[in-house]
Amino acid sequence: MATIQPIAGTTEQHPDVALVERVRGGDVSAYDELVRKYERQIFRISQHITQNREDAEDVVQDAFLKAYEKLDQFQGNSKFYTWLVRIAVNESLMRLRRRRTGKMVSIDEDVATEEGSVPRDLADWAPDPEQNYSRAELNRILRKTIKGLPPGFRVVFELRDVQGLSTEDTAEALGLSVPAVKSRLLRARLQLRERLTRYFRRRKGVEK
Amino acid sequence: MTCTEFLALLDDMIDSTELRADLKDHLKCCEHCEVTLNTTRKTIEIYRSHQIYEMPAGLRERLHAAIMARCKKGC
């Protein structure tokens, strides 16, 4: 009997593939599993791009609904999460354009900034600098600091460094080239580092 | 090795525990690059360990209801 057998030695199937297959077979509870698995990450990406809580909430809903409706178009050659991020990023950019009354906004826009390419403030940080702030204060500082970066930098940093996606998956999700992801990531890291130095620098006479 | 050449390789250094010999040599004599590497690592660690955007309460329920409503239309 002709059955499709996995070829010995091929890479292991991603667990999302089975969930997607179940959804395609009409099992909506499998889609619920995918939603629960990724809703937080998608919310964070949307919030990073839109910088607006209401918009980010709408994006999460629209992205998951759109992914559900378009599931037949999902090709197994990319990861489900990468595909979902791409939908969420496009939805987020659309919302951002609306807020900016139609002004073009793109993750791929060339950001002419030399900031961060060469560190200027080289002060060392205090040991465990986050201990000097309450959790709420620290969250406010971290939000304010990352908000100062261009949207394309924020989302590359979130995907690569916070969520731990590979450079290749980040590039695919954002429709960017691998060198573009690497360049944005380096500048994002250095700019964040420099901006955080204002809060975390070692102060003379404070630490012994 | 210059500081610019060192920084260009920062991406490879962030997650690696064992640095190449020429990078180690540069770090031994360049305090600026040592500070940059350590504080950049710390920047990533701090953002990784803090949820700066918590998902709003109730969003999951609204999302679930919206998907169920869409499903009833035909799935």
Image (cartoon, coloured by chain):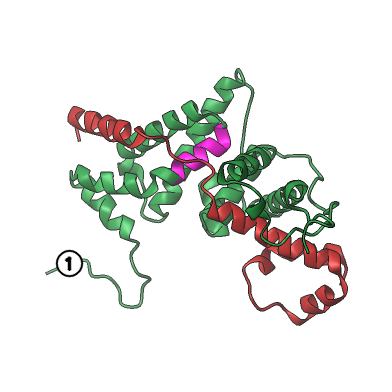
Which one is nearer the viewer's eye here, A50 or B50? B50
Residue under circle 1?
A3
Q: Which residue does the image show at 54% across and 43% down from the upper left?
A: B52
Rendered view: A71 above or below A123: above
> Which secondary structure type mostly characterizes the magenta part of the structure?
helix
Q: Colour of chain A?
A: green
The spot of residue B47 in percent (x, y) is: 59, 52
The spot of residue A152 in percent (x, y) is: 63, 41
Rendered view: A202 above or below A74: below
The spot of residue A164 in percent (x, y) is: 52, 58
The spot of residue A173 in percent (x, y) is: 51, 48
Rendered view: B32 above or below A29: below
The extreme top residue here reads: A101
The residues colored magenta run: A41-50
Chain coloured red: B
Side (left or right) of A38 relative to B72: right
The extreme bottom residue here reads: B21
Amino acid residing under circle 1 = Thr
The extreme left residue here reads: A1
Side (left or right) of A14 relative to B40: left
Q: Residues within 10 Å of mark 1 (few under 14, many from 20)?
A: few
Q: Please tell me whether residue A182 belongs to the stretch shown in magenta.
A: no
Rendered view: B22 above or below A138: below
Q: To which quarter of the image does residue A97 belong?
A: top right
Is label 1 in a helix, a strand or a loop? Answer: loop
